[in-house]
Amino acid sequence: MIRPKRILPVLCLTFLPLPGLAKELTEAEIKQLVYEAILERPEIIMQAVEMLQRDQDAAKAEAARVVLDNNRATLERDPNAPVLGNPEGDVTVVEFFDYNCPYCRRAMAPVQGLLKDDANIRLVYREWPILGDGSVFAARAALASRKQGKYEEFHWALMGMQGRATEASVIRIARETGLDVEQLRRDMETPEVEEHIATSMALSRKLGFNGTPSFVIGENLVPGFVEQPQLQELVKQAREAAE
């Protein structure tokens, strides 16, 4: 039985005996009064659930705000994270993704559209390979491609590939993109690559993300696929909040 703490005092006052007959109610008697009140007004249950949901939503929002405040610099200004769009843009969009995630591939078009339509977006990528060894290899290769100045081109090629990202398919696309594969394999083992992935894992846990894609835009944590209009609305909110 739901026992909403905000409703119980009202119910108790409603059913207190008249002056002169007052006595100290036992817990069992209070429960009985509450039970009778619920039978008489069942909508009390829904009201209690709604109040509880509002309290929980407010608590979650406050917890998210604290986490974002504590990790904002790493999320938005990590020098070891790839940045696309306008490096000096006034709104930063952070995307956690995996090359083998079908929803991340679907998100490619909305994200590209966002960058095309808004020249003041900084897009920060967090490589978060959680879907197997092929995802890990692809993420490491993409991060390593920065050494050859081809991250953006290689990233879009990997996102647009057919089939799963595996070592063989990633290397094939690397060659098609014009990357030096021998250098790429060496650079995949650098500390910067390892550090980026480890940081992505740590940030995703702190933010409560449990799948890809996931976005951080201003004060909003956005798990899952979103269309371009939704991204634009979130960017608008972040811009207005900053102003």
Image: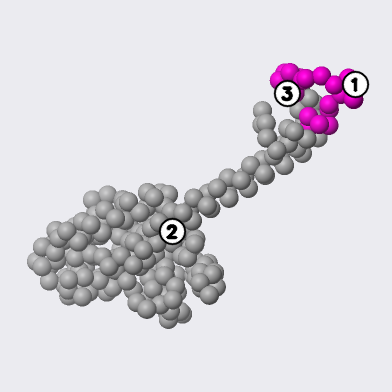
Picture layout, residue 16 above or below residue 130: above
- CB atoms of marks 3 and 2 within 8 Å: no
Q: In terms of secondary structure, where does tag 1 sit?
A: loop
Q: At label 1, which amino acid type do we have?
A: Gly
Q: Which residues are magenta?
A: 11-30
Report the residue marked by disc 2. 69
The question of residue 64 being in magenta is answered with no
Residue at the spot 52% in from the left edge and 52% down from the top edge: 62
Question: In x, y percent, where is residue 1?
Answer: 66, 28
Tell me, yes or no, if residue 114 can be seen here. Answer: yes
Give the colour scheme shown.
one colour
Q: In terms of secondary structure, where does tag 3 sit?
A: helix
Q: At label 3, which amino acid type do we have?
A: Lys
Q: Earlier in the sequence, mark 3 or mark 2?
A: 3
Mark 3 to mark 2 CA distance (whole Å)? 43 Å
> Residue 31 bears which disc, if any?
3
Mark 1 to mark 3 CA distance (whole Å)? 22 Å
